[in-house]
Image (cartoon, coloured by chain):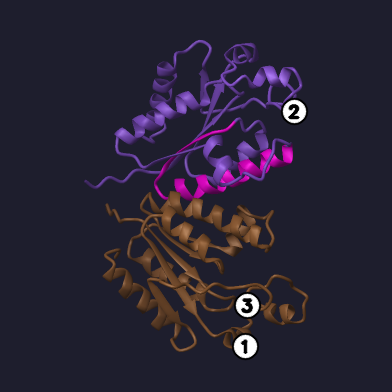
Chain colours: A purple, B brown
Amino acid sequence: MCEEHDGFTLWFTGLPCSGKSAVGDRVAAILKERGHRVERLDGDVVRQELTRDLGFSKKDRDENIRRVTFVAKLLSRNGVAVLTSFISPYREMRDRARKETTNFVEIYAKCPLDICIQRDVKGMYQKAIRGEIKEFTGISDPYEEPQSAEIVLETDKETVEESVQKVLRRLTELGLL
Amino acid sequence: MCEEHDGFTLWFTGLPCSGKSAVGDRVAAILKERGHRVERLDGDVVRQELTRDLGFSKKDRDENIRRVTFVAKLLSRNGVAVLTSFISPYREMRDRARKETTNFVEIYAKCPLDICIQRDVKGMYQKAIRGEIKEFTGISDPYEEPQSAEIVLETDKETVEESVQKVLRRLTELGLL
């Protein structure tokens, strides 16, 4: 077997519990099945290996995204399909990632805040609302919506599978699959 | 053209001015010519993009190498030839990199301290000797020699080109080229 794919960077952004990781995980699995080299970068991995010194101030969030961007840059220019899932609330840092990485595709997991609060998978929103967590995006910290994302997922209206198919269709249109 | 190579990690270690980067740069250029995907990771790049919060205490050096190891791991398991040049003075962290990355090859740029001091490319040794730089490896900070490096370069006795050929020969023997 000898397959060579172009690398690209699927940058999932959105509020906590907006569905970024659910869709990203599924897309990653499908790309692997299709023979792509795939790497997932998300908070769980990266905050352990790369950025465990960092908190959630704007400065620390920016530095977190800076390091992720560096890794995504090296991987995507070497033929890897990189899927990142980070709230990445600041437009400036997402635009920086767009410039630095290969074939950057911004994927906005769009979901109304009240639905995200209802989901509250890890109980973090409730803690933030009670003031037990500070600088929590959507409650006590800003989220700057993407203005020209390549893909917008409406995760309150679509199933995960529908969102996944939307991503795959768009990647085909963009010539990346 | 469709070429697929196994990834590997060439981990250059040695005192400041021991010749790690000169040999690494040349090997990287040759591997690129031969069609490999190649990434160089060295202090200049990494301390800008990944670890600019870090100093030179043991804790910070270890964290620096931890982050580099993470990046080398992701690249090498995706078919990239990764060449790292870091003093990486602590055996424990080099051994950790060996476990984490794909096809790890430790390359010790061996050179007597007095020769390194004579070279002193950036005048850092003199500053360290005068006490203007603290925690400088070889002067005021330890260097733990490799005990079972796959390749030992004697950079005081070999030309850069001889060292380069030694690396390429050994990589061929190891089945990596």
- Residue sitting at x 38%, y 70%: B30
Picture quadrant of residue B90: bottom right
- Residue sitting at x 47%, y 40%: A103
- Residue sitting at x 49%, y 87%: B156
Q: Residue furthest left?
A: A1
Q: Which amino acid does label 3 sit on?
A: Gly
Instruction: Between label 1 and label 3, give the one nearer the viewer.
Output: 3
> On screen, B38 above or below A53?
below
Mark 1 is surrounded, within 10 Å at the Cα level, by few (under 14), some (14 to 19) or many (20 or more) other residues, namely few
The alpha-carbon separation of the residues under discs 2 and 1 comes to: 54 Å
- Tell me where residue A109 appears, x and y as whole percent: 54, 22
- Tell me where residue A115 appears, x and y as whole percent: 60, 12
Is residue B20 at least partly visible in the picture? yes
Q: In the drawing, what numbered circle is on residue B118?
A: 1
- Tell me where residue A86 appears, x and y as whole percent: 57, 33
- Residue sitting at x 73%, y 37%: A58
Tally of numbered tags: 3
Q: In the drawing, what numbered circle is on residue B138?
A: 3
